Image: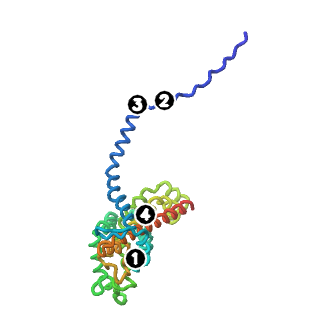
Amino acid sequence: MSATLERPAPAVAPRRTAPAKDSRKLIRGQVRAGWLLLSPALLHSGIFIVIPVVAAIVLSFTDYSFGDSWSWVGFGNYVDLFKDQDFRAALVNTILYAAVVIPVSMAVSLAVATGLNQKIKAIGFFRTAFYLPTVTATVAVATIWLWIYNPGSGLANGFLSLFGFAPGRWLSDPNTALPSLMLVGIWQGLGTKIIIYLAALQGVSRDLLESASLDGANRWQKFVNVTWPALGPVQFFVLVTSIVGTFQVFDLVYVMTKGGPGTETTVLVLDIYQNAFQALRLGFASAETVIMMLLIAIFIGLGRLLQKADVND
């Protein structure tokens, strides 16, 4: 008898079953719960961020000045802005302040955080000491530095006199007023950046560091090839927060110099305050606000491009 070969039955693709009714109900419930939890943050952002931004953009095209009457002036405020000498000085001072304070504070913070990440004695004391200026009120910080910069009895001149240097007029000299404020801004902003960098450094893979050590890498090579790439997202976060913070500097300048001498330390937010609440030119001040927002966006965009270039390298 000849054996008959039977053909195997064709494979049947598994049928896709629709999610059960209870599963769909569970998903919808999770979505509703998510939106409910997000609603306070969304409400806050809408009231205190979106609405003021839209209002500032609209008012920047008017000559509104806290009165009952106003008129549409189009781009007239923007044209007047760049003709205004005080605005041009505030724009230059703000860009210079940001260009110095941001990279220097980030570099110093990373260096200090790297040191605090080591096993040293009294590490808790040093971490607290570096963070204290951040939680101290800016008015108190400015008052302390006013005493340090005091031409007659200040600590700065007292220290320099030990080395035979002539006393300086730190905040009243046009050549040193803005750099003096930059130093205070760098010092005050170190704490937050150090804490962020320290948390990021503690998250760097120990296995990669040990592998690099076994391959004969020194400390600098491990930092460049292992630690630095791991800090990429944190670097961008610190950069963005630093850009926003430095462009919005106000209370430090207002307490220490009020923009003087002349306009040597006038920054954008101080000029906006003077135009809006002293000169009552709200439309003009709104145009300045829009320019400041555009500058912040440009700086953040440049930082993003630098980060991408660093990652690609």
Q: CA distance from mark 2 to mark 4?
A: 47 Å
Kindly identify the amino acid type of the residue bearing the numbered disc 3: Lys
Q: Nearer the viewer, residue 75 or 235?
A: 75
Task: Report the side of 297 relative to 134 (left or right).
Answer: right
The circle drawn on residue 21 is: 3
Badge 4 crowding class, 10 Å Cα cut-off, few under 14, some 14 to 19, many 20 or more, is some
Query: Which callout, 3 or 4, points to the residue nearer the camera?
Result: 3
Q: Earlier in the sequence, mark 3 or mark 4?
A: 3
For label 2, the residue is 17
Kindly identify the amino acid type of the residue bearing the numbered disc 1: Phe
The circle drawn on residue 212 is: none
Query: Helix, strand or loop at disc 4?
Result: helix
For label 1, the residue is 87
Q: Nearer the viewer, residue 59 or 290?
A: 59
- Name above or below for residue 158 compared with residue 272: below
Task: Report the side of 7 relative to 154 (left or right).
Answer: right
Query: Which callout, 1 or 2, points to the residue nearer the camera?
Result: 1
Q: Residue at x 45, y 70 (%)?
A: 103
Q: Earlier in the sequence, mark 4 or mark 1?
A: 1
For label 4, the residue is 240
